[in-house]
Amino acid sequence: MSAAQEHFWLGVQISPEHTSHHFGDEWDGTFFGFWNGAEYAPTPVYPPRAVDTHGFDRPPEPDTLQDVFGILRYSGSVAPYNFTAEWRRSLNSQDGDDIVYEADGVTTYNFFVTTDSDGGGSQGGGISHRQMTNLNSFRLEATGSTDLPPTIVHTPPLEIVAGEATTLSSRVVDLEGVAEVRVNYTDVHGLGANESMTLEGSLYIYTLPAQNASGTLSYLLWALDTTGNDATTGVYEISVVKLLHTPTITEVVPDGSECLLVRWDEVPDPSLTGYRLYRWNTSLSMMIGIATLSADDREYLDCNLLPDTTYTYWLVAFDAEDNESPPSVLGSGRTLGRSEPNPPPLAVEVSIIAAPLIAIIVGVVLLRRRST
C-alpha cells in the first residue's frame, strides 16, 4: 500500500448487540480516510480528521450532531507504510444517534474494522467495505473520578468590529461529563460580565454584545465537570476596531505638467475627523502617505510630479480615536507633458473662445467711428 494513493480509508463499527456486520440498526462508528468527498464532505486532506457515523449502511450515515477528536497518520519513508488511527470521544455524547457506552467492566461491545486502498471496494474513493476483520469485542474498565479538569479548546477571534455582535465557540471535553461552561469578559468601557455558554451540538456558544466604541475587550473561559474539577483558559485580549465608511475618489485630473488634482466625495459619518491620502511608490512597491487632510476637504493638489507620468492614489477616512476606514478604490491620473496645454473644463473653454470675438467686434466699431 502506497502513501501516494489518495483513497485509503479506515472505518470502525461498534455494536453492543450484534455480532455480525450484516445486521442493521444499532451501530456506532468512526471513519477516517481519503474518500472522494461524496460520502462525507468535504474531501479530506492529510492528516484526515475522524468522521462520526451511525448505522451500518454502505457507507454509514454521517452523524451531524456529534463530533469526535481524531486523525489518521502514516509513518515511514518507503512502502509498506504504517498507518495509525487515533481518536477519542465522550462516553456521554448526549446524542440519540449514538450507542450508550457503559464503563462498568462488564458490558461487551462488538466491533469490526474495515479498510481499503484503491481496491475493488473503494472504486476510486467510494466507501463499500472491501477488507474486514473478524468479530472483535472490548469492555470499558470501571473507573471512579479521575480528578482531571475539563479540557477547553478555543480559538479567539482576531479582532472585533464595533457595532457587530461576535460569537465565541468552544469545545469542552471531560471524562466525567461537563457540568457548566462560562465566559467572563470585560468590555471596552471596563464593565464586567460573567455569562453561561450554551451547548449547541458539540460546541459551547456565547454571543458577545456589540461594542459601541473601539478599544480592548478581554475575556476568559471557565469550565466545571460533574465531580467538581474546573479549568480556566488564559485571558484573551481582543482589539475592538471601528470601521468608518469608505471614501470614494471621484477624479484625478492634471493641473499642469507637475501637478494632479485629486477629488473625492464627502464621507457621511459624524465621527469623521479627516482623511489620509496615499500615493503608490514604485521604487518601494507600496502606498506612501502624502497628506493628512481635514474633514471639510474635498480635494488635494499633488505637485512636484514628473511630467507625462501616471500616478495612483487611495484615500482613507479616520476619526478622533485614529480608527481608519478601509481604503478607497484606486484612482489614477496622468500629468501633462511639458509642452502639452492644460485641458480646461468645457465651461472655461467656451468663455475663452467667446472673449476674443467680442473684443474684435468692439474694435471694429471703434475704428469705423474714428474714420467718419
Image (cartoon, rainbow, N blue to C red):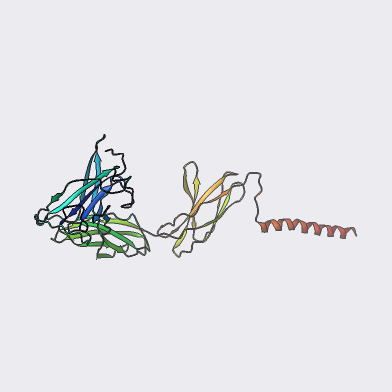
| Percent x, y of residue 141 | 10, 53
Residue 159, x across and y down, in percent: 34, 56
Indicate the quadrant where residue 161 lies.
bottom left
Depth check, front residue: 135 or 368: 135
Residue that extends furthest to the right in the rendered view of this protein: 372
Based on the displayed image, in which of its 4 quarters is residue 80 positioned? Answer: top left
Viewer-closest of 120 and 219 = 120
Q: Is residue 355 left or right of residue 204?
A: right
Name the residue nearer the viewer: 327 or 164: 164
- Residue 311 lies, in percent from the top left, at 54, 47
Which image quarter holds the C terminus?
bottom right
Which residue occupies the foreground of this view, 46 or 258? 46
Q: Residue at x 25, y 54 (%)?
A: 52
Residue farthest along the top direction in this orientation: 78
Left or right, 226 with reference to 36: left
Residue 234 visible in the current orientation: no
**Which quadrant of the figure contains the N terminus?**
top left
